[in-house]
Amino acid sequence: MDLGEFQIPGNSDPNQKTSHLSLDIGGSLIKLVYFSTNDGDDDDELGRSGKGSVGVSNGNRSFPVLKGRLHFSKFETRKINDCLDFIQTKRLHIGGCQLLGALPIEKTIIKATGGGAYKYADLFKEKLGICLDKEDEMDCLVAGANFLLKAVHQEAFTYLDGKKEFVQIDHNDLYPYLLVNIGSGVSMIKVEGDGKFERVSGTNVGGGTFWGLGRLLTKCKSFDELLELSHQGNNRVIDMLVGDIYGGTDYSKVGLSSTTIASSFGKAISDKKELQDYRPEDIARSLLRMISNNIGQIAYLNALRFGLKRIFFGGFFIRGHAYTMDTIAVAVHFWSKGEAKAMFLRHEGFLGALGAFMSYEKHGLDDLMVHHLTQKFPMSSLVGDKICSPLNGELNDNESIECSVYAS
Ligand SMILES: Nc1ncnc2c1ncn2[C@@H]1O[C@H](COP(=O)(O)OP(=O)(O)OP(=O)(O)O)[C@@H](O)[C@H]1O
Ligand SMILES: CC(C)(CO)[C@@H](O)C(=O)NCCC(=O)O
């Protein structure tokens, strides 16, 4: 990762103070969220002091409010050393103590979730002297999703027929919903309230499957290359369609059109072709479609199981990619006969890391509560079937959003 791309350069800006680093260390990616304030800022309309804080009263208590930015970043888990270097260079691990004066450096505790919080605990201790304070992955996913849906304007959107529409979330009518997190593997969680949820299903055919199989079959060197390739491909070259089986006609009696995929990769049975005879872009497209469609279908079946009408999809597999979202949305629409709705999240890949961030409050390390987020970047536009900046693949990288937090 090019550190120079970072929107607000960490502690290379002497006025900037960072704090509350939180990590989600998954099977494929490590996600980081942290908060920064700018010491040198002038007072603003709230009468904020030079320290970037202002007191507000909340019931019986008075909280100082810190205004600043939430930063998002990610690294591949296989390159965990890059992540450790990043944290060290920017001194993210000690910023919390400096900013809020809570703990001595030797007791630095960082909230972390995901399997890697267990797997890499010793590495973080050894290399950075950090103690990872483990938070449950599902708790964090749900806390992150609930927070985004309530606090961030234009977070959720539908995507159908190449059209993106933001969904106005009514805070009083958010639950219940199905949260489908597509990471390396897929978790499906029925969410009924804050901290009230059940992981009702999952599938091992997820983002890791797409990237792993795709890498083997296409020789792509990066996930983004594979995704880009899929954009240019034609899955019909390799998928067996209903029409291929039915001599070009629909199987209308059961509602299957001739263009429906009857069997993903099915044409490879009878084509007298070897792997190298297929174009990598067609393979990538077929793979993406197979996995997205399968997840959409399983998600719908679980929504049906519990009578849930709304399904929110998160996880870094999606990457704001038009074809992925379209395939998932079509699967949900098709199987539910239009009854259920697939919705996507702008901060799709950061649910767990945000949940870990929110948990600083829960455990009283510092009484921290984000109460307002404002996005300063322009909203995306669509060109053809590709979503352009900033809702393209890199939206979630190195982004920061304005926010204010209560802290005591
Ligand atoms: N730059 C990237 N490198 C690798 N995978 C990527 C990248 N961008 C998106 N992905 C996709 O996102 C998936 C990982 O998503 P995510 O970070 O949400 O899950 P995870 O936390 O790593 O996995 P799990 O929760 O199952 O442990 C990958 O398996 C891949 O499909
Ligand atoms: C194992 C986890 C929870 C790790 O994030 C995830 O990869 C997952 O949900 N996998 C799918 C496991 C299953 O339910 O089949």
Image (cartoon, grey):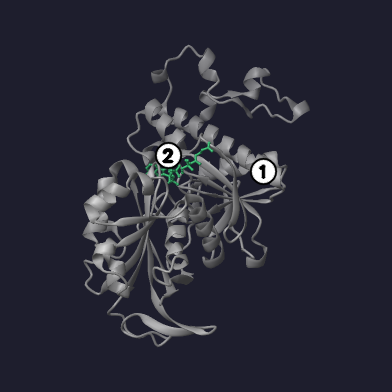
Q: Position of residue 238 (x, y in %)?
A: 51, 23
Please tell me which residue is depicted at 26% across the width and 52% down the height of the picture. 125
Q: Which residue is mark 2?
A: 227
Tag 1 or tag 2, which sits nearer the N-term? 2
Q: Residue placed at 52% from the left, 61% from the top?
A: 148
Q: Is residue 2 visible?
A: no
Q: Amino acid at mark 2?
A: Leu
Q: Are marks 2 and 1 in contact (CB under 8 Å)?
A: no
Q: Is residue 4 above or below residue 77?
A: below
Q: Is mark 2 within 8 Å of ligand 1?
A: yes
- In the displayed structure, 242 sits above or below 111; it is above
Going 43% across and 29% down the picture, which residue do you hit? 213
C-alpha span from label 2 to label 1: 23 Å
Q: Amino acid at mark 1?
A: His
Observer able to see residue 226? yes
Residue ID for mark 1:
333
Q: For the residue carrying disc 1, how many other residues have a C-alpha within 10 Å: few (<14), some (14-19), or many (20+)? A: some
Q: Secondary structure at mark 2?
A: helix
Task: Specify the quadrant of the image occupied by residue 292.
Answer: top right
